Image (spheres, grey):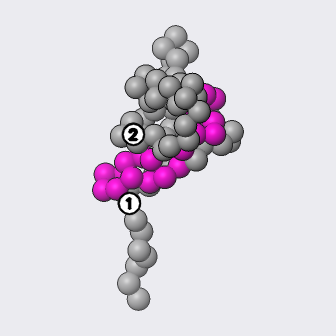
Amino acid sequence: MGRSKKKGPYVDYKVLGKVMKQKDSGSRDAIKTWARSCIIVPEFIGHNFTIHDGHKFIPLFVTEGMVGHKLGEFALTRTYHGHSK
C-alpha cells in the first residue's frame, strides 16, 4: 500500500459508518458513494456498493479478493472503443 504504516490505510469514515449501520439493520441495499480512494477493508465483504465514475454509478459486490484494493479500481472511468479500421 502507498501509505505509511503509521498512518494506516485510508478508509472513508462516512462509508464505513454506512456499512456498520447496514450490518446492524440487516439491510442489503446498495451504498452509494463517491469515495473512489477508499480502501476496501474486511468489514465491506458481502456488501453492495454503487461507485461514481464521473458519469454514472457502477454497481459492485465486494468479495474477499478485493480487500486491500481501492473502490475506484472496480469502476473504470474511461471506455476504450478500439481504433478505427
Alpha-carbon span between mark 2 and mark 1 = 18 Å
Q: Residue at x 52, y 11 (%)?
A: 6
Q: Is residue 46 visible?
A: yes
Q: Is residue 11 visible?
A: no
**Residue 54 is a magenta residue:** yes
Nearer-N-terminus badge (2/1): 2
Q: Quadrant of residue 31?
A: top left
Q: Residue 18: percent from the left, percent from the top?
A: 46, 29
**Mark 1 residue type:** Arg
**Mark 2 residue type:** Thr
Q: Mark 2 Cα within 10 Å, few/some/many (few <14, many 20+)?
A: some
Q: Quadrant of residue 42?
A: top right
Does 67 appear above or below 74?
A: above
Q: Nearer the viewer, residue 54 or 19?
A: 19
Helix, strand or loop for disc 1 = loop
In the picture as drawn, the residue positioned furthest to the bottom comes out as: 85
Does 57 appear above or below 79?
A: above
Helix, strand or loop for disc 2 = strand
Residue 33's disc number: 2
Q: Quadrant of the C terminus?
A: bottom left
Question: Quick check: 32 left or right of 22?
Answer: left
Q: Nearer the viewer, residue 20 or 83?
A: 20
Question: Quick check: 6 left or right of 63?
Answer: left
Residue 78's disc number: 1
Which residues make up the magenta segment?
42-60
Q: Residue at x 31, y 51 (%)?
A: 54
Q: Residue 45: percent from the left, percent from the top?
A: 63, 36
Q: Residue 14: percent from the left, percent from the top?
A: 40, 26
Q: Residue at x 58, y 47 (%)?
A: 61
Q: Nearer the viewer, mark 2 or mark 1?
A: 2
Q: Quadrant of the N terminus?
A: top right
Q: Residue 51: percent from the left, percent from the top?
A: 42, 46
